[in-house]
Amino acid sequence: MRALFLALLLLFAAPLAAEPTLPPAALADTPLPDAAQEAKAQALMHELRCLVCQNQSIADSHADMAGDMRALVRERIAAGENPDDVRAWLITRYGDWVSFDPPKAGATLGLWLAPLLFLGVGLLLALRLFRRRGTESKS
């Protein structure tokens, strides 16, 4: 019975141990003093995908990883980097998936062409079905 109690205690204590103990990055939630730089940083943050939440931008996510990425974007923008260069660096580090607008080349080309391919196949199937029905009704 004692072993069962300890096992349950450890089971429920594990999520508490997983909570982050480090404070958030300095610029994660602190806007830059220069309004123009902050506007650039905000625009870029809305174009980058949170790697934890997956369907949220780093601007909207409360995940620690998103906070670290927001801080990194603000640090680089404050240092005078161009937002396109910051995006390119993040894509190099995390892959094309970090951007909500991945490049239209290489491995992502299939993602851009697949909807057109499926639409074409669907239209061909619909045409064949309508033609078949048309010939059956005439007979």
Image: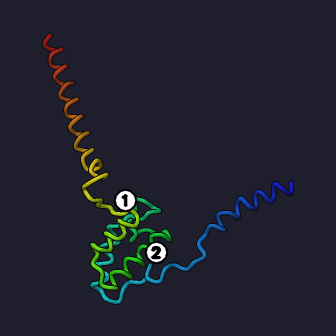
Farthest bottom residue in view: 33
> Which quadrant of the structure image shows residue 80?
bottom left
x then y, percent, for residue 41: 32, 78
> Which quadrant of the structure image shows residue 48?
bottom left
Which residue is found at the position 45% from the left and 61% from the top? 53
x then y, percent, for residue 85: 29, 74
Which residue is found at the position 31% from the left and 72% from the top? 44
Q: In what quadrant of the picture does the N terminus appear?
A: bottom right
To which residue does mark 2 refer? 68
Farthest right residue in view: 1
Farthest top residue in view: 139
Which residue is found at the position 76% from the left and 57% from the top? 8
Which residue is found at the position 59% from the left and 72% from the top? 20
Question: What SS does tag 1 mark?
Answer: helix
Q: Amino acid at mark 1?
A: Trp
Crowd around label 1: few <14 · some 14–19 · many ≥20 (10 Å): some
Query: Looking at this view, is 98 or 33 the one in front?
Result: 98
x then y, percent, for residue 12: 70, 61
Crowd around label 2: few <14 · some 14–19 · many ≥20 (10 Å): some
Question: What SS does tag 2 mark?
Answer: helix
Query: Looking at this view, is 5 or 114 the one in front?
Result: 114
Residue 64 vs residue 119: left or right? Answer: right
x then y, percent, for residue 49: 38, 64
Tell me if label 2 and label 1 are in contact, CB under 8 Å.
no
Residue 90 vs residue 10: left or right? Answer: left
Q: Amino acid at mark 2?
A: Asp
Q: Earlier in the sequence, mark 2 or mark 1?
A: 2
To which residue does mark 1 refer? 97
